[in-house]
Image (cartoon, rainbow, N blue to C red):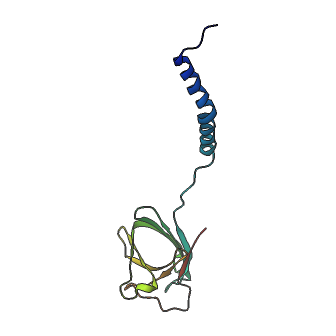
Amino acid sequence: MPRPSDWSRARARATLFALVVWIPIACAGDARDAADPPSIVPPRYAGTLPCLDCAAIDTRVTLFAGDSFLLEEDYRGTTQGDRTYRSRGTWASLGDAASPTSGRILMLSPNGGETRRFRMLGDSALRQLDRTGRDVRSTSNTLLLREP
C-alpha cells in the first residue's frame, strides 16, 4: 500500500483540526445567535404632576439615544375635559452650577414649545423644576419615577 504524501497528511490534519476545534466553536456561536438579542429600552419616567388649572397632569418622558425625547402629558379635569398633549424635541443633561452636589439638570426643549427642567436623581427619578431651574415649592408630588 503506498504511503500518503506529506500534502495529504497536512490536509487530513487540517480537516481533523477543523472538526475538533472549529465546529464546536461555530455551533456555540449559533446557539448564542439563536437567543433573543438584548433589547435596549430607552429610559422612561412617569408620574402625576400638579396642575394650576386642572386636577393633575399624568406625565411620561421617554429619553431616546442621542438627544431626542417624547413628552406625553394627560391633563385631567380641565374646564374643557381631559386633554392629551405629545411633544418631541431634544434633551440635554447639564451640571447644576449653583449646587453641583445636588444632581444634574435635564433640559427638555420641545420643538416649538417651552423648555422644561428636571433634576436627575440618579437613574431612578426626575424632580420637576420651575422655569428658572429651581426646585418647585409644593406639597404635591413633583417626581417622575423611572419605569422598569
- From the top left corner, tell me how far across and down residue 19 is, in percent: 62, 30
- From the top left corner, tell me how far across and down residue 67 is, in percent: 40, 64
Quarter of the figure with residue 12: top right
- Asked if one can make out residue 77 in the rendered structure from this viewpoint, the answer is no
Residue 52 sits above or below residue 106 on the image = below
- Say which of 50 and 89 sits in front: 89
- Say which of 83 and 91 sits in front: 91
Q: Residue at x 61, y 8 (%)?
A: 2
Quarter of the figure with residue 81: bottom right
- From the top left corner, tell me how far across and down residue 72 is, in percent: 50, 69
Q: Residue at x 58, y 14 (%)?
A: 4
- Say which of 19 and 30 sits in front: 19
Residue 36 sits above or below residue 8 on the image = below
- From the top left corner, tell me how far across and down residue 121 is, in percent: 51, 80
- Asked if one can make out residue 125 in the rendered structure from this viewpoint, the answer is yes
Residue 61 sits above or below residue 31 on the image = below
Q: Residue at x 35, y 69 (%)?
A: 112
| Numbered circles on residues, count | 0
**In this rendering, would 83 be left or right of 34?**
left
**In this rendering, would 45 be left or right of 100?**
right
Quarter of the image with the C terminus in it: bottom right
**In this rendering, would 122 be left or right of 132?**
right
- Say which of 144 and 15 sits in front: 15
Quarter of the image with the N terminus in it: top right
